[in-house]
Image: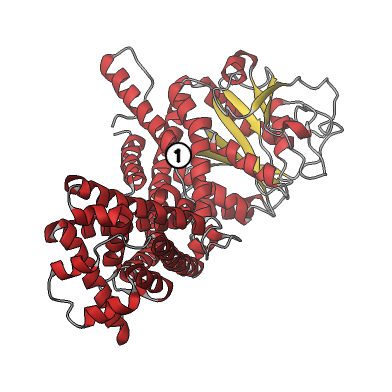
């Protein structure tokens, strides 16, 4: 990957520039669609990282990459009451921003720039999410507590632009809210502005320079290799050497050896709330020298941009790990649900093949259908004497099969609903034992089936019974001349086929084995007498497959209530992880300028 460079008329350079820009756009697109829905340890931090990284891409990286020659944006940041606004007023020589004792003072960020740099900042080239508000210089003699645009509570997401010839051309000053403000919005905005800076003017005081919050931000600056100037404000006379030496030592330990350090002594303000000009003269001279060096400014912009891209690479790599954690957790949650419903499917399959359904009402209606007493005594005396005897027994029109169908529907519905409810309860309990699953369920109870499920099951059973009748009808179409087919009809033979499907007897004991066994044998012999052995095996298999397919669909509908809470993470692969890892590697190369 090429280094970060300006677009050029040179073919190779321009092509490399477009490739780098395409990479940055790909990272933005990936961050926009990144989903981290599961509440895992570190997930909220990862979400914040993704949000901040996306915002930095839009606020700074992409705009700066497209215009390396644009003026530098120096953000003045620091702790509450450190004197940021007073410093900015001193750097331009007159009050332009508000300063006061009531905190937080800086509610709306103010960007000061040279009039010839107006076009660079009046558009949404940088910080595009902040609306532009044109401010005016305060009249001569205005106190610092009255200066600057009047903050509008409804315009928190805005940037006040003030053109002032006292600001050196090529460097703009942005007075940011306090990094440790009591206002959440102010702290977030301060972080956003610092992330969009080419360099920082970090203001602290002699008694607060070791505070934790500013140092977290300074460490972030070190990771980005951003140019930092630390202004040690309000240093008591006689303590300058000791305090500045201690602060410089701290900067060195944290990787900020190259940071500029300026000391502003404790000084009384004049009637306009201004510092004497000599107090900030070294800082003003440093900014003016930077502004006058066009090549140097470009180097600073390139250095910060490369460092920011490298830091972004590390953040994207961390997001890839967070996405992997999400994926692995989602697979576990998915496995928990699938296992519960697969167990339900197995139990339904056993219940519909081991003869269990031939208890109670189904068996009674079947016995009524075939003529219970004489029929079973005849079976006991010699059921294996051949299909002709069985066929003879059934000559003539059998009784209506409607009651058997209704009993099958009721019994089968009870089995499916009960097993689906047990599966939902099992899945719900497994999820509630997992913090991620518990958060997905929230206050909703999924430990039972939906209210419409029993009716849906009944409708599917009736549809399956229609499937069975269709199988009989199709198979008998070529046998319309046979007396047995004509005498029993579609409904009668369909009921017999359903009984055969349910009558494998694996789960029955005692006298039930004989009853179910006789039922299965006589039904199968009857069907064989009409259709033949091969056809009966095929019909039984197809009817069985149709039933299992419909049961699977019913369970899948209840299972989906859980899986839809996981979303796309429940799929078997994780392309997002792979894409993030690949992008992180490419960003690292881009940030090194290699």
Does dot 1 land on a helix, a strand or a loop?
A: helix
- Residue farthest bottom in this picture: 510
On the question of residue 196 being in view, the answer is: yes
Q: Residue at x 46, y 28 (%)?
A: 62
Q: Residue at x 51, y 36 (%)?
A: 56
Q: In the picture provided, is 266 more to the left or to the right than 40?
A: right
Which of the 4 image quarters holds residue 540?
Answer: bottom left
Instruction: Please tell me which residue lies in front, 337 or 243.
Output: 337
Instruction: Please tell me which residue lies in front, 583 or 76.
Output: 583
Q: In the picture provided, is 524 more to the left or to the right than 225?
A: left
Q: From the top left corner, tell me how far across and down residue 455 is, in percent.
A: 51, 56
Query: Against 22, is 592 above or below?
Result: below
- Residue tagged by mark 1? 33
- Residue farthest front in this picture: 396
* Label 1 CA crowd tier, 10 Å (few <14, some 14–19, many 20+): few
> Looking at the rendering, in which quadrant would you find the N terminus?
top left
Figure colour scheme: secondary structure
Query: Against 117, is 531 above or below?
Result: below
Instruction: Please tell me which residue lies in front, 246 or 366.
Output: 366
Q: How many marks?
A: 1
> Looking at the rendering, in which quadrant would you find the C terminus?
top left
Q: In the picture provided, is 442 more to the left or to the right than 425?
A: right
Q: From the top left corner, tell me how far across and down residue 472 is, in percent.
A: 25, 52
Instruction: Please tell me which residue lies in front, 476 or 206.
Output: 476
On the question of residue 276 being in view, the answer is: no
Q: From the top left corner, tell me how far across and down residue 583 is, in percent.
A: 34, 40
Q: From the top left corner, tell me how far across and down residue 459 is, in percent.
A: 45, 53
Query: Against 549, is 121 above or below?
Result: above
Q: Residue at x 18, y 58 (%)?
A: 530
């Amino acid at each position: 990957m090429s280094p970060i460079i300006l677009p050029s008329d040179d073919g190779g350079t321009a092509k490399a520039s477009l490739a780098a820009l395409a990479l940055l756009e790909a990272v933005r697109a990936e961050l926009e669609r990144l989903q981290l829905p599961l509440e895992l340890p570190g997930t909220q931090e990862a979400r914040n990282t993704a949000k901040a990284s996306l915002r930095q891409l839009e606020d700074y990286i992409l705009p700066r990459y497209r215009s390396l020659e644009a003026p530098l944006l120096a953000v003045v940041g620091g702790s509450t009451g450190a004197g940021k606004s007073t410093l900015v007023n001193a750097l331009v020589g007159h009050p332009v921003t508000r300063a006061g004792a009531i905190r937080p003072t800086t509610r709306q960020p103010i960007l000061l720039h040279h009039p010839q740099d107006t076009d660079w900042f009046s558009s949404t080239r940088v910080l595009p999410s902040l609306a532009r508000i044109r401010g005016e210089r305060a009249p001569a003699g205005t106190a610092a507590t009255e200066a600057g645009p009047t903050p509008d509570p409804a315009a928190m997401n805005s940037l006040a632009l003030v053109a002032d010839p006292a600001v050196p051309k090529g460097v703009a000053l942005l007075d940011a809210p306090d990094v440790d403000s009591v206002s959440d919005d102010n702290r977030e905005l301060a972080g956003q502005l610092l992330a969009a800076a080419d360099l920082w003017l970090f203001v602290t005081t002699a008694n607060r320079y070791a505070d934790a919050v500013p140092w977290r931000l300074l460490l972030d600056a070190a990771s980005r290799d951003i140019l930092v100037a630390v202004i040690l404000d309000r240093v008591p006379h006689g303590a300058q050497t000791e305090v500045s030496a201690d602060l410089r030592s701290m900067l060195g330990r944290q990787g900020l050896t190259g940071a500029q350090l300026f000391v502003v002594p404790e000084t009384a303000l004049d009637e306009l709330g201004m510092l004497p000009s000599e107090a900030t003269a070294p800082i003003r001279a440093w900014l003016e020298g930077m502004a006058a060096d066009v090549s140097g400014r470009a180097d600073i912009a390139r250095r910060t941009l490369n460092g920011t891209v490298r830091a972004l690479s590390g953040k994207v790599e961390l997001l890839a790990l967070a996405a992997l954690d999400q994926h692995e957790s989602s697979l576990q949650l998915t496995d928990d649900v699938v296992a519960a419903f697969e167990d339900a499917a197995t139990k339904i399959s056993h219940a519909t093949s081991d003869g269990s359904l031939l208890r109670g009402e189904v068996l009674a209606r079947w016995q009524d259908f075939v003529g219970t007493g004489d029929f079973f005594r005849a079976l006991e005396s010699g059921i294996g004497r051949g299909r002709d005897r069985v066929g003879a027994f059934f000559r003539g029109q059998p009784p209506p099969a409607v009651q058997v169908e209704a009993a099958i529907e009721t019994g089968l519905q009870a089995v499916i609903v009960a097993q689906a409810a047990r599966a939902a309860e099992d899945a719900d309990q497994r999820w509630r034992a997992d913090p991620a699953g518990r958060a997905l369920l929230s206050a909703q109870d999924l430990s039972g089936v939906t209210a419409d499920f029993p009716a849906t099951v009944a409708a599917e059973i009736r549809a399956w019974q229609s499937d069975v009748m269709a199988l009989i009808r199709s198979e008998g179409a070529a046998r319309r001349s046979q007396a047995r087919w004509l005498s029993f009809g579609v409904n009668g033979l369909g009921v017999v086929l359903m009984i055969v499907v349910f009558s494998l007897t694996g789960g029955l004991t005692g006298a039930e084995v004989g009853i179910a066994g006789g039922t299965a044998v006589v039904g199968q012999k009857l069907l064989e007498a009409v259709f033949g052995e091969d056809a009966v095996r095929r019909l039984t298999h197809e009817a069985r497959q149709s039933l299992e397919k419909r049961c699977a669909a019913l369970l899948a509908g209840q299972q989906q209530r859980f899986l839809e809470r996981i979303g796309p993470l429940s799929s078997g692969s994780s392309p997002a992880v792979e894409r993030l890892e690949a992008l992180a590697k490419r960003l690292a190369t881009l940030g090194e300028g290699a």
